[in-house]
């Protein structure tokens, strides 16, 4: 592949990523300024992406948003997230939901972020931030923190290359503070989201390891803050840790054998 073609691909990918995470409309001039691209280069790349369905131009505002081709890719990702791993862990996640009576989520590492790959709704259907396939904020989501606490330094660095947005006053927005929080998670073995995404909602997460001893997912229980606490003697914490260990066992994690 020629260097010019490689650079063109990188510019196209940068433009597509500029629409994450909320896919708000952006104009050509704003995109070129935000990404440091010459206006002619940005315009040419945008036209190509639009012709292939990766971008869509609003005929009224003349601005762009992500197009149907991106949606098709997202569906493919969602499908893959709901095949092998979900089928393996679904019974364990559902059992935890039944045991606790709270919503349980399987959060999976995907590239440089995590996504919700399965949601087992509790009987009270507590609202959680997002649905299956949605990307989650690594600095606030309990699952992301549980995974990153046991990930390699390179993986953590890749996550921290992105901004750490604030969702509530409790959200960690400092890279240094976030690294310290991961150290705490690593020591106690589980993570917490204490009203860091939604006020009134807490979550507890525990990492899931695969056969290569790598953290690839997390089991997360979410519910009202008055019911979900993060103390080490909490029955919820113990149940989440037990389920995560059982899932790791099914994924052939060498150190995660659990007698069921």
Image: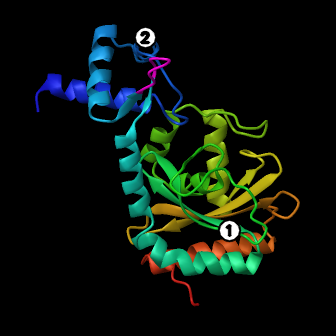
Question: In the image, which disc is placed on residue 54?
Answer: none
59 w.r.t. 106: above or below: above
Magenta segment includes 60: yes
Q: Which colour style is shown?
A: rainbow
In the shown orientation, is residue 187 left or right of residue 201? left
**Residue 2 lies in what quarter of the image?**
top left
Q: Position of residue 33 (x, y in %)?
A: 44, 11
Q: Which residues are magenta?
A: 57-63
| Quadrant of the frame with the C terminus | bottom right
Residue at the (84%, 57%) spot, across then down? 225
Q: Position of residue 184 (x, y in %)?
A: 68, 53
Residue at the (46%, 76%) spot, across then down? 87
Identify the residue under disc 2.
Answer: 29
Q: Residue furthest right?
A: 226
13 w.r.t. 246: above or below: above
**Residue 62 lies in what quarter of the image?**
top left
């Amino acid at each position: 592949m020629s260097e010019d073609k490689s650079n063109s691909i990188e510019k196209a990918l940068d433009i597509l990523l500029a629409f994450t995470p909320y896919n708000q409309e952006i104009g050509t001039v704003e995109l070129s300024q935000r990404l440091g691209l010459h206006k002619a280069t940005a315009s040419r790349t945008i036209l190509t992406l639009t012709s292939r369905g990766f971008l869509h131009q609003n005929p009224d505002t003349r601005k762009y948003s992500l197009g149907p081709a991106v949606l098709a890719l997202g569906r493919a990702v969602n499908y893959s997230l709901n095949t092998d791993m979900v089928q393996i862990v679904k019974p364990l996640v559902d059992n935890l939901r039944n045991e606790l009576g709270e919503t349980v989520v399987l959060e999976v590492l995907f590239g440089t972020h995590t996504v919700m790959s399965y949601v087992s709704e509790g009987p009270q259907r507590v609202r959680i931030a997002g649905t299956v396939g949605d990307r989650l904020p690594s600095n606030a989501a309990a699952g992301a923190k549980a995974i990153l606490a046991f990930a390699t330094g390179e993986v953590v660095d890749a996550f921290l290359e992105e901004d750490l947005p604030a969702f509530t006053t409790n959200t960690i927005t400092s890279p240094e503070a976030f690294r310290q929080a991961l150290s705490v998670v690593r020591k106690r073995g589980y993570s917490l989201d204490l009203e860091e995404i939604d006020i009134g909602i807490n979550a507890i997460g525990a990492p899931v390891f695969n056969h290569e001893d790598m953290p690839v997912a997390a089991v997360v229980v979410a519910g009202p803050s008055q019911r979900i606490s993060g103390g080490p003697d909490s029955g919820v914490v113990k149940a989440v840790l037990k389920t995560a260990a059982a899932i790791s066992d099914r994924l052939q994690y060498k150190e995660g054998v659990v007698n069921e």
